Amino acid sequence: MAKKIMFQGTSSNVGKSILCTALCRIFYRKGFKTVPFKAQNMALNSYVT
């Protein structure tokens, strides 16, 4: 089974996506297969900040 890494932040716009992108690029260049996934909040109480 593949190893997994999860990034969590304290709020929006704290740099989770850019950190994930950078690490995926580093791992890919070292020969690892990387597959990023971004979950979407589909709750009724969600709003754009």
Image: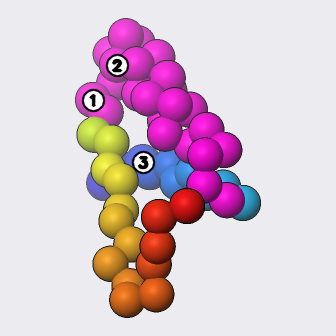
Return the residue at label 1.
Answer: 33
Please tell me how crowded label 1 is: few (under 14), some (14-19), or many (20+) other residues with Cα within 10 Å: few
Gap in angstroms between the C-alphas marked 1 and 2 = 6 Å
Return the residue at label 3.
Answer: 3
Note whether 26 is above or below 18 in the view shown.
above
Q: Is residue 20 magenta?
A: yes
* View extreme (top): residue: 29
Q: Nearer the viewer, residue 4 or 48?
A: 48
Quadrant assignment, res 30: top left
Q: Amino acid at mark 1?
A: Lys
Mark nearer the N terminus (3 vs 2): 3
Find numbered disc 3 in the image and state the secondary structure of the residue it sits on.
Answer: loop
Residues shaded magenta:
11-34
* View extreme (bottom): residue: 44
Please tell me how crowded label 2 is: few (under 14), some (14-19), or many (20+) other residues with Cα within 10 Å: few
Q: Nearer the viewer, residue 1 or 9?
A: 9
Please give the count of numbered marks on the rendered protein. Answer: 3
Q: With 25 as the anchor, is 10 left or right in this view?
A: right
Q: Are marks 1 and 2 in contact (CB under 8 Å)?
A: yes
Q: Amino acid at mark 3?
A: Lys
For the point 39% across and 72% down, the residue is 41
Tell which tag, 3 or 2, sits nearer the viewer: 2
Q: Is residue 30 magenta?
A: yes
For the point 60% across and 55% down, the residue is 12
Quadrant assignment, res 8: bottom right
For the point 67% across and 59% down, the residue is 11
Please tell me how crowded label 3 is: few (under 14), some (14-19), or many (20+) other residues with Cα within 10 Å: few
Return the residue at label 2.
Answer: 28
Q: Are marks 1 and 3 in contact (CB under 8 Å)?
A: no
* View extreme (right): residue: 10
Give residue 17's position: percent from left, percent from top: 49, 39
